[in-house]
């Protein structure tokens, strides 16, 4: 699974990198070294303009934790932060979004944890690892998004609609596989257009885009256990672990 990641690039940089032509400057997210479920996160998506019908690439925030359109309340999203690549096309919560509402979720890298047993005076703890592309380029994590209508809010209130997302995961390989059995699935730059195209709805062709990265493209290193607390944030979370933090 992927339950925490890093996203520090500015919206200006992301819009340029992903060739997004629409971004509202009023939509601002602070850089985060500890992105957690239910946080607002940057996404890249292609969506038809309501007036012209032209498909436009947009950079916009989404709430992490997908809420299906048929959900009774938004809280269900906290349990839907990840969708398995092996079953995403069939699961009722994800299949409609997989067909029509796919997105990319930019990340610097992601965290996974390895349990470390107690030894002598040392308490048991979970050692976090930061896993990132070896070339330090952005990870374009495969995602899905949904629009959920809050029945408790008036129709003319912009807050009536909640936009949410989930990260597609796959079996971990290479360095990541030595840390955790699952990992977020990144879409290769050459496949961004095909993945985002809402008119591209062939399940077999879409599943073919969900391929694990080649060996040697990911690096993992132990980092500060301060990241274990979602209330902590800042670049210091990527520092090497401090022995004193484990006790």
Image (cartoon, grey):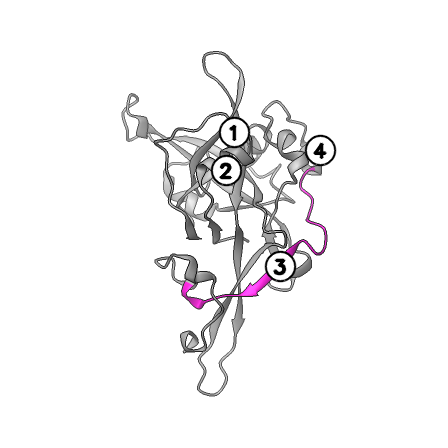
Q: CA distance from mark 3 to mark 1?
A: 28 Å
Dot 2 corresponds to which residue? 14
Task: Tell me which segment is drawn in magenta.
Answer: 209-226
Q: Residue furthest bottom?
A: 120
Answer with mark 3 or mark 1, whichever residue precedes in sequence.
1
121 over 48 or under it: above or below: below
Answer with mark 3 or mark 2, whichever residue precedes in sequence.
2
Answer with mark 2 or mark 4, whichever residue precedes in sequence.
2
Q: CA distance from mark 3 to mark 2?
A: 22 Å
Residue at 59% in and 51% down: 136
Q: Position of residue 71 (x, y in %)?
A: 42, 36
Q: Dot 2 surroundings within 10 Å: few (below 14), some, or many (20 or more)? A: some
Q: Are the residues at dot 1 and dot 2 in contact (C-beta closer than 8 Å)?
A: yes
Is residue 58 visible in the rendered structure shown here? yes
* Disc on res. 204: 4
Q: Are the residues at dot 3 and dot 4 in contact (C-beta closer than 8 Å)?
A: no
Closer to the camera: disc 3 or disc 4? 3
Answer with mark 3 or mark 4, whichever residue precedes in sequence.
4
Q: Is residue 220 magenta?
A: yes
Q: Dot 1 surroundings within 10 Å: few (below 14), some, or many (20 or more)? A: some
Dot 1 corresponds to which residue? 20
User: What is the quadrant of the C terminus in the image?
Assistant: bottom left
């Amino acid at each position: 699974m992927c339950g925490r990641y890093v996203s520090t690039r500015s919206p200006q940089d992301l819009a340029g990198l992903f060739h997004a032509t629409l971004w509202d400057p009023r939509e601002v997210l602070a850089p985060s070294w500890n992105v957690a479920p239910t946080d607002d996160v940057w996404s890249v998506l292609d969506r038809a303009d309501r007036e012209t019908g032209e498909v436009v690439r947009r950079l916009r925030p989404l709430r992490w934790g997908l809420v299906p359109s048929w959900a009774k309340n938004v809280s269900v999203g906290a349990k839907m932060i990840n969708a398995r690549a092996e079953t995403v096309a069939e699961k009722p919560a994800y299949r409609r979004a997989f067909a029509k509402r796919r997105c990319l979720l930019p990340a610097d890298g992601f965290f996974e944890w390895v349990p470390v047993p107690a030894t002598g005076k040392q308490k048991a703890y979970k050692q976090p690892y930061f896993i990132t592309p070896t070339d330090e380029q952005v990870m374009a994590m495969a995602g899905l998004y949904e629009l959920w209508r809050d029945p408790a809010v008036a129709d003319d209130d912009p807050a009536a609609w909640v936009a949410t997302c989930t990260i597609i995961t796959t079996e971990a390989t290479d360095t990541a596989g030595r840390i955790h059995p699952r990992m977020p699935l990144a879409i290769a730059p050459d496949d961004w257009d095909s993945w985002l195209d809402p008119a591209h709805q062939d399940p077999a062709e879409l599943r073919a885009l969900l391929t694990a990265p080649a060996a040697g493209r990911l690096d993992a290193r132990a980092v500060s256990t301060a990241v274990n607390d979602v209330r902590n944030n800042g670049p210091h979370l990527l520092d090497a672990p401090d022995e004193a933090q484990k006790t």
